[in-house]
Image (cartoon, grey):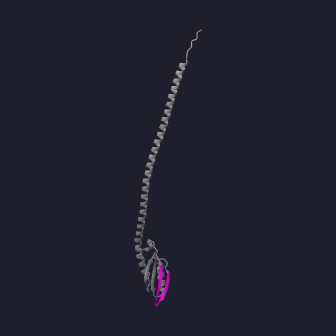
Amino acid sequence: MSVTQINLRPWREERNARLQKNFITNLVMAALLGALTVYGIIYFYDFQTDRQRARNNYLTQEIAKLDKKLEEIRELKRQRERLLERLNAIQELQGNRPIIVRNFDEMVRVLPDGIHYSSLTRSGEAINVDGLAAVNEDVSELMRNLNSSIWFGEPNLSRVNAQNAQRSFNLRVPLTKPKAEEAE
């Protein structure tokens, strides 16, 4: 019996070398694919980060523009308030002009015989009256007349002095603004 001997060693070595070569090729390909994947992910995140930075910069610039416009609006509102205050002051002065004339006209109307004014001064919302009267009853009548007028409040007599045959007096009369229907 003759036994044929087959040597499988070179075939196994070739197969092992081929498998090792395939393994190394697959390992290199996997490493390259992994590196490309990592590079792609890094590139994607860098691209997204740059895009977000550009958006943030754009928003920051737009916010700065809006802040500037808001400051301009605030300044315009301040100017508007100042102009409205000036306009109101002018309107009040023009509106009070006929009232002042009416007050002094009324001061003449309520003046009884026997009294004359030596000075009339306005301080705020009141008129200070210095005058001379023949008798004390004339001062009382003047105070009643002032009190009954719709243009004046209750007068406050601060002094009465007798000088020779005359009485000098000082009183303070608050000013009032009657309603339009009362003033007519």
Q: Estimate the x, y position of residue 115 in percent, counting from the top left.
A: 44, 85
- The correct choice, above or below, for 82 with respect to 103 in the image is above
- Residue nearest the viewer, comparing 55 with 73: 55
Name the quadrant of the C terminus. bottom left
The quadrant in which residue 133 appears is: bottom left
Residue at image location 55% in from the left, 19% down from the top? 9
- Residue nearest the viewer, comparing 30 with 81: 30
Name the quadrant of the N terminus. top right
Task: Kindly tell me whether residue 109 is visible in this rendering.
Answer: no
Q: Estimate the x, y position of residue 146 in percent, counting from the top left.
A: 47, 79
Q: Residue furthest bottom?
A: 164
Residue at image location 42% in from the left, 78% down from the top? 104
- The correct choice, above or below, for 64 with respect to 48 in the image is below
What secondary structure is the magenta-colored segment mainly? Answer: strand
Task: Please state the extent of the stretch shown in magenta in the rendering.
Answer: 157-172
Q: Estimate the x, y position of residue 16 in percent, counting from the top left.
A: 54, 23
Task: Kindly tell me whether residue 27 is visible in this rendering.
Answer: yes
The magenta stretch spans residue 162: yes
- Residue nearest the viewer, comparing 75 with 17: 17
- Residue nearest the viewer, comparing 120 with 115: 120
Q: Estimate the x, y position of residue 176 in percent, counting from the top left.
A: 46, 74
The magenta stretch spans residue 170: yes
The quadrant in which residue 51 appears is: top left
Residue at image location 42% in from the left, 60% down from the top? 75
